[in-house]
Amino acid sequence: MTTTIPISAPDDPRIAAYRNVRERDLVGREGRFVAEGKVVLNVLFAARRFTAESALILDKRLDGVTDTLALAPSDLPVYVADQATMDAIAGFHIHRGILAIGRKRVEDDALELLAALHADALVVVLVGISNHDNVGAIFRNAAAFGADAVILDRESCDPLYRKAIRVSVGAALKIPYAVMGDAEAIHACLAEAGFEQLAMTPRDADDILRIAPTGRQAIYLGAEGPGLPEDLMARMRRVRIDMEADFDSLNVAAASAVALHRLRRTGRAAIA
């Protein structure tokens, strides 16, 4: 059983990692991240891809997370506070009242990650996507449609940013991912690993319905507006989502859902 520890003062040193949540999102947490909400904590505790250091639960929510805490390590400290104390700790009204601190792991090596995947692996590549909502939603879509991994360039936002984790409903804590320097390095890495590389773009491209979901494939997504660099797309097959003639694009997260649904590997076990 986990140990519950009452907290009555927002300056208690034991909950220092939870203080001023929004401000520290911007400056970092020295190798830690915040997981928020029951569903996200379920993934954090069940997947065990990342180490959980502690949890902070609103007192009136404690009974409702008994099943969640049963998934946590038995020695996990679970701090419990009332609403006023929790709001003072976080720096704003935190109505969900269910938080945990996780520790980041050593970044996966992209080549090693790709080499370990299936012969028909599906990989999502993010280039210059700095919007946390979009990154979180793409991870959620990747989990929903069975993608095996996500590769991000250094310009894309950290998938362990609090909001990205929350929007992903925990998928960012479950799906293997790696970060590389730039799109050129990612392209070379995927080529070496034997992937067909597909560039999502609304212009001068084949309908994605013409792409057979087979073999090792990587689907590239660029930032809304600029999209993927032209010189990068010149070395890949360009694919688009067919839509009405007077409208040429979707939000990048929505586009990822359509593309990943088309490329889904049916009949294969989902990500563990």
Image (cartoon, rainbow, N blue to C red):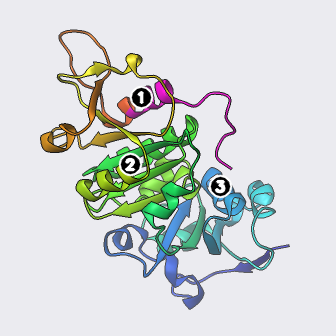
- Image quarter for residue 63? bottom right
Categorize mark 1 by other alpha carbons within 10 Å: few (<14), some (14-19), many (20+).
many
Q: Please give left or right for residue 125 compared with residue 182 in the image.
A: right
Residue at 59% from the left image edge and 55% from the top image edge = 174
Crowd rating for badge 3 (residues with CA inside 10 Å; few <14, some 14–19, many 20+): many
Q: Is mark 2 on a helix, strand or loop?
A: helix
Q: Do the residues labelled 1 and 3 touch (CB within 8 Å)?
A: no
Indicate which label's residue lies in the foreground, 1 or 2: 1
Please state which amino acid type lies under the numbered disc 2: Val
Name the residue tied to disc 1: 259
Residue 29 percent coordinates (x, y): 42, 78
Q: Nearer the viewer, residue 231 or 130?
A: 231
Identify the amino acid type marked 3: Val
Q: Is residue 153 visible?
A: yes
Q: Is tag 1's residue or tag 3's residue first in the polypeptide sequence?
A: 3
Residue on which disc 2 sits:
135
Percent from the top left, x then y, of residue 6?
71, 79
Q: Which residue lies furthest to the right in this view?
A: 1
Tag 3 residue = 43
How far is the residue under mark 1 from the one under mark 2? 15 Å
Q: Identify the residue at horizontal 44%, vertical 61% (top origin).
A: 111
Q: What stretch is highlighted in magenta?
A: 256-272
Q: As drawn, which residue projects farthest toward the bottom?
A: 13
Q: Is residue 186 above or below residue 3?
A: above
